[in-house]
């Protein structure tokens, strides 16, 4: 498990909310992390450290950076929309990419990110600052 960036002290009620929202694999999903943050009075950016402080991992990034969510095909129109925000190469902040879902759906945006060269930076939940997706290499 990655090192804590900020020590978060959770009370028993806050811990209980996290534990009640775990998936069957004992992890808190990306999407549920936003809900739990609101319920327990934390900023979303504090959720990674809050979960780490009690030995819980956040899973299933809605943008496909980590986890086991399955995605459909990428959308060229969404890719063009997201590409307007490229910083270095194909780097775009998580929060910026989520805004693209306002014009579509989070699932379609996730599919576009997962199946393209877009690199997500600055996770809104504090899970990573900059993450490189594992590139697929087709073997002939």
Image: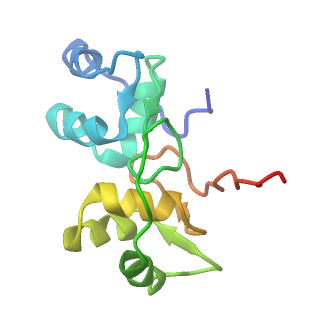
Given residues 85 and 136, the one toward you in this image is 136
Q: Quadrant of residue 95?
A: bottom left
Q: How many marks?
A: 0
Q: Residue at x 31, y 54 (%)?
A: 107
Give the answer, above or below, for where 54 lies relative to 114: above
- 115 vs 17, left or right, is right
In the figure, residue 112 lies in which quadrant?
bottom left
Outermost residue toward the right in this view: 140
Q: Residue furthest front?
A: 140
Which residue is at 82% across, 51% downward? Answer: 139
Specify the color scheme: rainbow
Which part of the image, by quadrant, shows the C terminus? bottom right
Vertical arrangement, residue 104 with respect to residue 29, above or below: below
**Image coordinates for residue 22, horizontal then vertical, percent:** 31, 20
Observer able to see residue 131: yes
Residue depicted at x 50% and y 43%? 127
Quarter that holds the N terminus: top right
Residue 8 visible in image: no
Q: Where residue 60 appears, x then y in whole percent?
A: 43, 38
Residue pushed farthest left? 39
Of residue 45 and residue 95, the one placed in the foreground of this image is 95
The residue that appears at 62% across and 32% down in the rendered structure is 2
Q: Position of residue 122 (x, y in %)?
A: 50, 59
Task: From the viewer's perspective, tell me whether residue 93 is left or right of residue 140.
Answer: left
Q: Is residue 120 positioned above or below 51 on the image?
A: below
Q: x%, y% of residue 30?
A: 36, 40
Q: Is residue 13 left or right of residue 133?
A: left
């Amino acid at each position: 498990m990655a090192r804590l960036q900020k020590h978060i002290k959770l009370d028993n009620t806050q811990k209980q909310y996290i534990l009640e929202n775990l998936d069957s694999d004992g992890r808190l999903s990306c999407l549920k992390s936003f809900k739990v943050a609101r319920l327990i009075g934390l900023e979303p950016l504090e959720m990674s450290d809050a979960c780490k402080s009690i030995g819980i991992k956040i899973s299933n990034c809605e943008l496909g950076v980590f986890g086991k969510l399955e995605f459909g095909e990428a959308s060229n129109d969404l890719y063009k929309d997201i590409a307007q925000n490229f910083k270095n190469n194909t780097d775009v902040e998580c929060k910026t990419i989520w805004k693209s879902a306002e014009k579509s759906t989070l699932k379609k945006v996730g599919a576009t990110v997962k199946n393209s060269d877009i690199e997500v930076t600055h996770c809104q939940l504090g899970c990573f600052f900059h993450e490189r997706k594992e590139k697929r290499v087709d073997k002939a």
